[in-house]
Image (cartoon, rainbow, N blue to C red):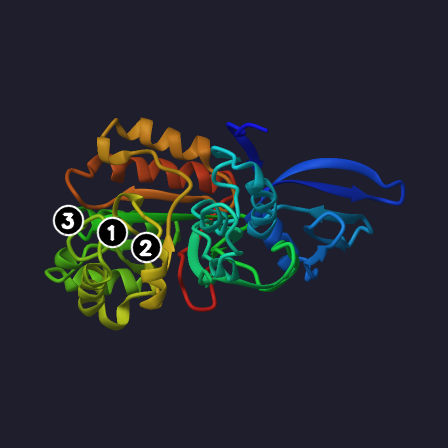
Amino acid sequence: MGDIEVVRLRAGNGGIVREGSAHIAIRVSLSFEEAVLSAKDSEAEITFDPETSNPHFSFIEDDGKRHEVWFLDGVTAFNEIHAADAYRPAGYAVWRLGSEDPTIWSVLQQNYGVQAPGALHRIGMSEDIDFEGEGELLRVGDAPAEGARTFEVDGDTGQIVDEKYSAVPTPFVIQRSGDLPGKIALTFDDGPSPYTSQVLDRLQRYEAKATFFVIGRLAQAQPELLQRIETAGHTLGNHTYDHRSLRGLTEEAFDQAVEETQVVLGEHTSKCLRPPYGSTDAHTVAYAAKLGYALVLWTVDPRDWRRPGAAVIARHVVTHAAPGAIVVLHDGGGDRSQTVAALEIILRQLTAQGYHFAALCQEGGHG
């Protein structure tokens, strides 16, 4: 027999789910990570089927539906490749890239006929992020963790005949909170500035509470405005010291940008951080969590900083308003007269619609 040019290897893809007493089979597409996380979440034990040499598990939902999940992993990849080694294939294709057990790469890098690599024991951490809950306040629920497995090799064939998962790889779990049923959160960035007092006047007129994400270097020069914000029952949040993007920063640079503002605000501040420009990366939430901060984003953005006109700003906010909405506006960073004028319209129209306005990040309150 001549050399086989290509063998197509499918890894980390596919599953069969059986639901209900009729056992109707429905094929669904699962990545390796989705499969093992499903086992973890359902507290199901992953077992190795000796007849098919595939890992699988089953569980029953609260509604009584039974799910049976079969999946492929690094062990099945090794067994497939080991069986094909006698034919010396020229190469393999992995389908779908990104859905595979990461340990298959330790198998693909081996020569023909070698033993199962020790790297199969350790399953690298997931790079995905799992969001749980509702709201735009983000906190780390769980840090990512590696998975681990043991396996048994047949001394005669070299095939893996059993495997056991002692831990599955898990991603970052980000807890969402700050949901505001029946209320709207108005937030103001980039202050304090001369316009902050005008914003406070209008909030007071409508008995509305808000959250001010302030820049440390500006706040340092205007302690009287910070005091007025706090005295009125609003929340002070951290918007970094000099409005630099937090994306791509080292942990040391991140800590400096946030903690310098913390020093300025002192006991007045909440433990909520709004990243400038809303710009984040895989490390932002984790770095913030180490400092005890939750990240706060938004759901409604009229882009008032572009100064499109007070009517345009107000119309966007009123049109997109909904219970639980978090609106981002700006009381600093330039001429904010349009924002102040728009705020009057926003407060008047949304109050007439029955909305109330709540501050975020207050102890015992939202988030």
Q: Residues within 10 Å of mark 3 (few under 14, many from 20)?
A: some
Q: Residue farthest to the front?
A: 1
Q: Which of 22/13 is in front? A: 13
Q: Is residue 97 left or right of residue 281?
A: right
SS of the residue under disc 3: helix
Q: Is residue 81 above or below residue 252?
A: above
At a point 65% along the width and 58% down the height, the residue shown is: 156
| Residue positioned 70% across, 60% down in the render | 44
Left or right of 259, for residue 75: right
Amino acid type assigned to the residue bearing label 2 in the image: Thr
Q: Quadrant of the C terminus?
A: bottom left
Q: Which residue is mark 1?
A: 246
Q: Earlier in the sequence, mark 1 or mark 2?
A: 1
Q: Kindly tell me whether residue 233 is visible in this rendering.
A: no
Name the kind of residue labelled 3 in the image.
Pro
Question: Which residue was labeled with disc 2?
Answer: 284
Query: Mark 1 and 2 residues: CB-CB less than 8 Å, in contact?
Result: yes
- Compared across the picture, whether 1 is left or right of 342 comes to right
Q: Outermost residue toward the left?
A: 221
Disc 3 marks which residue? 194
Residue 139 % position (x, y): 43, 60
Separation of marks 1 and 3 at Cα, in angstroms: 26 Å
Mark 3 or mark 2: name the one nearer the start of the chain: 3
**Residue 240 location, quadrant:** bottom left
Disc 1 packing (10 Å; few <14; some 14–19; many ≥20): many
Alpha carbons under labels 1 and 2: distance apart = 7 Å
Task: Choose between 99 and 291: the one closer to the eye.
Answer: 99
